[in-house]
Structure formats: C-alpha cells, structure tokens
C-alpha cells in the first residue's frame, strides 16, 4: 500500500533510506528538509508491506532560476526501497503515485537526478534539452525533467536551485 507519510513514520523513513543507500546521506537529507520546512507531507509517500515501511519517495520544492525569472518546481529526491524489496515494482509504484499526487496538488515540473534508462519510463527526458541545468557536475543523461502539464516547460530555462539541506548533507552529488 502507498500512502502519505504520518508523524509516526519518521524513524522508519530514516531507516529505509539508510538501508536502501547503504549510508546516511539521503536519510539525513529527508530529516534536514523536514526540519527546514522544505517538506510537504502530502509529497512524502511511503510503501507499506503489512505494518512495515519498505519504500519512500519525496518531492521537495526547487526553483529553476534564469536571468529573468524564477520558476517553482519539484525534485524527485530521494527514492528509496528496502533492499529486500527491490526489483519488485515498488519504486515504480512510488514514482507513479507520487507524480499523480504532484499533479493533483497543481505542480507543473519535476526534476530528477537518476539512472538514464529508468526514469524515462515515467516520461522524464534530458533537462538540458529544455535549457535546464544542474548546479553541480552531472552527466546530461542523468539530469532529467518532466512536465506534469502540457507546455509546462515551454520557455523555461535556467539552473536548478535546491533547498539548502541538499548542500548541508551533500545529497545531490551522491
């Protein structure tokens, strides 16, 4: 079952991120975003098996900054699935449900740093093709964007500005 996080899920979310990544960068990122207020619980979804949290996805706010404009968007970061449950479609289900929730809440753009053969399955394409760039070194094919509405990326270009928690935890380069 996929659902929005609840306050009692915080420790389990930390643990699933820690276990999925084998280090605590992403787990600390989630906590830092929550502490900084860069966090919408409706955009923090968990996958449950029984009463156990086995997956988590978060869509924190970002800004695409150009010389003339700033455009609100979301990042997909992190996506974590417990190692015992990987390759079973749980990550895909979290992405699909998460993107539906982003659309339902009126968000227009999602950006992800991720595997170039995985995220295109969900409609993500190379962000650079739209003139959107990462603020850190990143292969072009791993930095992707997805318009959630028709024309959402028309005329949008610039460099993505992530919340400060990404810098504080070093998460966007991991």
Image (spheres, grey):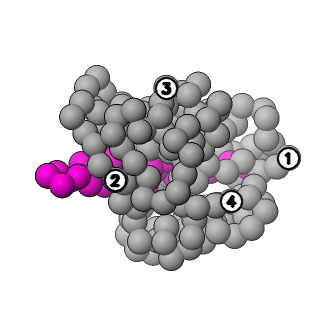
Q: Is residue 20 magenta?
A: no
**Residue situated in front as seen by the camera: 151 or 15:** 151
SS at circle 2:
strand
Say which residue label 4 marks: 17
Mark positioned earlier in the residue sequence (2 or 1):
1
Viewer-proximal residue among 160 and 14 = 160
Q: Is residue 112 above or below residue 119?
A: below
Is label 4 in contact with label 3 (beta carbons under 8 Å)? no
Question: How far apart are the two marked residues, 4 and 1, measured between alpha carbons?
Answer: 13 Å
Percent x, y of residue 159: 34, 53
The disc, 2 or 3, on the residue closer to the chain's N-terminal end is: 3
Numbered circle sitting on residue 84: 1
**What's the distance in space between the residues labelled 4 and 3, CA to CA?**
24 Å
* Tag shown at residue 159: 2
| Mark-to-mark CA distance, 2 and 3 | 21 Å
Which-is-in-front pick, marks 2 and 1? Answer: 2
Asked if the magenta segment contains residue 59, the reply would be: yes
Name which of mark 4 and mark 3 comes first in the sequence: 4
């Amino acid at each position: 079952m996929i659902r929005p996080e609840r306050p009692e899920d915080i420790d389990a979310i930390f643990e699933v991120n820690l276990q999925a990544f084998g280090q605590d960068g992403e787990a600390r990122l989630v906590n830092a975003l929550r502490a900084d207020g860069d966090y919408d619980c409706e955009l923090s979804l968990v996958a449950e098996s029984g009463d156990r949290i086995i997956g988590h996805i978060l869509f924190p706010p970002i800004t695409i900054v150009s010389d003339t404009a700033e455009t609100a968007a979301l990042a997909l970061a992190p996506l974590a699935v417990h190692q015992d449950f990987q390759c079973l479609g749980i990550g895909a289900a979290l992405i699909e449900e998460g993107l539906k929730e982003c659309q339902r809440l009126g968000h227009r753009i999602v950006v992800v740093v991720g595997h170039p053969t995985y995220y295109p399955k969900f409609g993500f394409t190379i962000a650079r093709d739209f003139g959107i760039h990462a603020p850190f070194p990143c292969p072009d094919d791993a930095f992707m964007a997805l318009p959630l509405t028709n024309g959402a990326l028309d005329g949008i270009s610039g460099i993505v500005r992530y919340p400060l928690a990404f810098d504080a935890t070093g998460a966007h380069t991991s």
